[in-house]
Image (cartoon, helix red, strand yellow):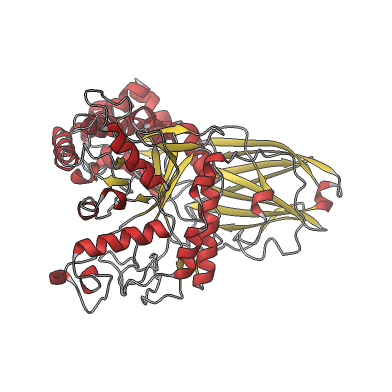
Amino acid sequence: MNSTLLFYFAFICSKSKPGLELDNPAIRVGNSVSGHSLFITPSGKQFWSFGVCCVDQGPPKDKYDPKNPSYHAWSLFPTEREWALDSVQKLQNWGFNTLGGWSDYSVISKLPPKKRMPYTVVLHLGAYFRAPWDDLFSLDAKKAIERAAYDQIQPIREDKNLIGYFTDNELGWWDDTLFLHYLKNLPIESIGRKTAHAMLKKLYGRFDKFKLDWNTESSGWDDFARKPSLTLKPKGKGIRAVNLWMRTIGEHYYKTVHDAIRKNDQSHLILGDRYQQYYNIELARSSSKWIDVCSTNMGADWIDGTFSPFFLRTLHQVTRKPILISEFYMCSTENRSGNKNSSAGFPVVPTQVERAKSFFRNVNAFGELPYVIGAHWFQFSDEPQHGRGDGENFNMGLVDINGLAYKEVTEAAKAVKPESFLNRVEEKQEARKVPFVSIDPMSSASLLRWPRSVAVVRSNQGDGFGDLFAVQTKDALYIALYAMDFTDESLYLGGNIPESERSLWNLKVGKLKIGIRFGGQAGKGKPLPLKIIGNGVQAIEKPDLKHTIILKVPFSALGGRTSKLSLTGLLQSHSRGESMGWKSNLTL
């Protein structure tokens, strides 16, 4: 009996006990015997949520654009019920057990119980008030969020197929920019601007202490409140104010949406707000007591379907919640919908066969992590042939715009077996020999050809915002950094990040000390020219939101090849906002 049938068997059984209130009337979170996070139905059935987003009918007939063909159910099925029956049957046959965000559950909910599926809802609560860019602290924001919650939750709050609510999707939590925006761009009488100003005044007390960290033309707190001017002073500690602001605004947002949901529904889960492949650590930390599950959208870091460990590991550590991958994706230039995959941001492979392999590898990598509670594929059908209204044009679908399945991908989905994840235990990293490679590790700034799963050197200091990898050839040790740090140049005088304020990576390998600063360079996404650091050490760098640096350290610079090398390292983000470190022995 599959999980969906068991779910409904539990629902029927619950009706046989009149007068008794169930202890767990809704789906909840828990752990398997092995410790893997999972969802639990009211009957106690455990499942790992393997879902699909946007299971919908496409545009209605009167809004269909023949010049930009897209999936449209009205040309494929005589009724919406027939569409729903067919779509759910396909998803269940392909091994999926959940409907992800933006799915047409209003139609699917009318099917017989055996044909329904557990589902999630994206409420877009903050987005009703352009959060976080409009004043989240205002009474208008609170009223808009509460009204949106009431309107959306009341019709579905009794549905036992409902897993829970995403509060928003991909809000613009860009820390440096958001800090400046609330201080400078909101109206002077706005509560948000006053809150940011009061936070700074409480943090620093006297204005002369504030001026130790910030360049400003203002003469005092009152003058600063009227016409704020500020840029970070080199070697100061001003970045702590940015981090404090993210905790302040995060605490307010997560409490506000939590309270709005709980005013309407005490039972169903609050699933977070779907980060957009980036998160500020202090913001994520602020969510902890207001959510049941933390969610993030996450494309693979490399086109083989793998990702760097730090992103999910740290998100789990700072929120102390299970993680739901609310979107993941893999696209191919070979597709039947004519998608060009033309904008940046999503992994793209040449063929559907490679897409299926990467899809399978991606899901299984999620499932191996005991704190990941599920993953939802984006999306059911391909995007329109010439792209969505926002320009996004990708081969995202399980089916093409004519409703035909990409069998390579759907067969890969069948092979996933999400129930097998429940008994998995995360592999503990043991001391490994630094892998020997025959490739040129610096042939590009991508780590795609590196054996990353056995080359990773885990950090043991601070909240990780990057990973370190090490490989060797007969002549040299290669050490790579893959790290995340958003920087708004507007924080700095003239919009230029001084050398002393750029991210700093210090290493000591054996007796050799290496230091490299990075960040703030133009041409993001393109490798920079090879750098010669000294002692024969070379570096290649690829600037981006997730920054890559590869160091070539000749064994001659280390005094020759040895069987073991000590490695210590410290990584500081821009202006020393965050830090993390490594202390390890490398076996060669």
User: Residue 380: horizontal and vertical position, in percent?
Assistant: 35, 62
User: Residue 372: horizontal and vertical position, in percent?
Assistant: 48, 41
> Closest to the observer: 190 or 381?
381
Q: Quadrant of residue 134?
A: top left
176 to 554, vertically: above or below: above
The reply, left or right, for residue 175 in relation to residue 557 is left
> Closest to the observer: 548 or 92?
92
16 to 435, vertically: above or below: above
Residue pushed farthest front?
16
The reply, left or right, for residue 530 in relation to residue 471 is left
> Closest to the observer: 511 or 310?
310
Residue in view at x 47 percent, y 59 percent:
413
User: Residue 63: horizontal and vertical position, in percent?
Assistant: 15, 69
Give the number of marks.
Answer: 0
| Residue 518 visible in the picture | no
Residue in view at x 49 percent, y 64 percent:
411
Residue in view at x 56 percent, y 32 percent:
462
| Residue 372 visible in the picture | yes
The reply, left or right, for residue 496 in relation to residue 54 is right
Residue in view at x 25 percent, y 76 percent:
68
User: Residue 328: horizontal and vertical position, in percent?
Assistant: 43, 55
The reply, left or right, for residue 485 in relation to residue 513 is left
